[in-house]
Image (tube, grey):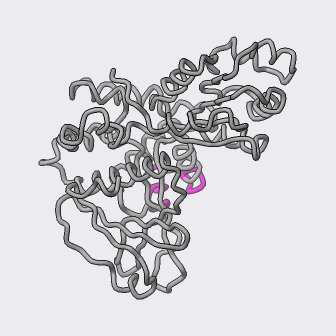
Amino acid sequence: MIQYRRHLFDQIQRQLYKGKTLLLFGARRTGKTYLIKKLVDEEKGKYLNGETQQVREQLSSTNTAQLKELIGNQKLIALDEVQSIPNIGMILKVLHDTFPEVQFIATGSSSFELINATTEPLTGRSRVYTLYPISFQELKEEEGYLETYARLDSLLRFGLYPEVLSKSDEDKKEELANIASNYLYKDALMMGGIKRPELINEILKLLAFQIGQEVSLNEISNKTNASIQTIQRYLYLLEQSYVITSLGSFSRNLRNEIGKSRKYYFIDLGIRNSIINNFNLLTIRNDVGQLWENFCILERMKKNEYERRYVKRYFWRTYAQQEIDYIEEIDGKLSTFEFKWSDSKGKIPKQFAEAYPGYEYKIITKNNMMEFV
């Protein structure tokens, strides 16, 4: 498997030894372990796997003498996949405060547990990062623009998980099925109090056909025979364990604007296509527009995260079906985007233009995507 140079590596390396504990989140199999092991190698630090019984026992208390024995004379300690370690937030706080000369890095694949467990004790003491599957830009830097652009159809079918990219099409399908069944939902199932594991796949299959559309909780509830509260909880768990992401609707309370809906996208299109078992060529698919919208929004998320651009993200729609696929707000300025696989024609809805002057509007196609991702 090719080991891609990750943009977050440079970001994190620049933050070493600045008095902050570094927290790295992201789905399993996205490359967190490789990234921190590379840091450990370069910095001559120590790597600890938080999923092993030995490490969990070593970190079972905040006894400073016991922790000192674990740390030794290391200047950098990387704690990998620590979401299953009890009281990890308090332990990290004690480590941070007791050993200020040591750089601590902790990774986790489920932010709904780790964020709750770490951010409050580590207030003012940490920096948080998210690692996604390989980005188009990272792939381009490894393979070159023309080669990567030529793979665009395949990326929309099989996604960008590191272990998938270098395999044959048949092996990609098997690897994606393996990731989805054995890794992706592990933390949600283990820590989320899931009582109906099969409901996860039912919900994801319904979401897979609704990319770019407002999701109706009532509809999902009726089709899965689950309460709306249960659907909301499962969606939350899936989002916090990096299976899906969502956009809320943009509204400044114009009477015709939709104000409380959400749209959901998959963190990786290969997982999405595996869930519905559709890896057909784009030329015979009827969902290319959905795939392209999901791809663009996820690549933009990666870009924003890795460049540390703090944006508010929305979509916009009216009850009269005027719509804008994607909006970013930075310092009160609105940038609006439409995603079209081939057709570059379009214009901003009149009602939006009149209500929100000063906006920027662009149509993103495969021909000008580089300026966006």
In the rendered image, the vertical position of residue 45 relative to residue 225, given as above or below: above
Which residue is located at x 49 percent, y 38 percent? Answer: 8
In the rendered image, the vertical position of residue 71 relative to residue 85, given as above or below: above
Is residue 207 among what the camera can see? no
Q: Is residue 282 left or right of residue 210?
A: left
Q: In the picture, residue 337 is in which quadrant? A: bottom left
- x and y, in percent, of residue 271 in the image: 36, 38
Report the front residue among 197 and 96: 96
Which residue is located at x 39 percent, y 70 percent? Answer: 336
Which residue is located at x 34 percent, y 57 percent? Answer: 372
- All told, the count of numbered labels is 0
Report the front residue among 208 and 74: 74
Q: Is residue 192 left or right of residue 251?
A: right
What's drawn in magenta, residue-wise? 217-231
Magenta run includes residue 163: no
- x and y, in percent, of residue 167 in the image: 26, 24
Q: Is residue 302 left or right of residue 169?
A: right
The dominant secondary structure in magenta is helix
In the rendered image, the vertical position of residue 200 relative to residue 324, given as above or below: above
Report the front residue among 35 and 214: 35
Report the front residue among 151 and 116: 151
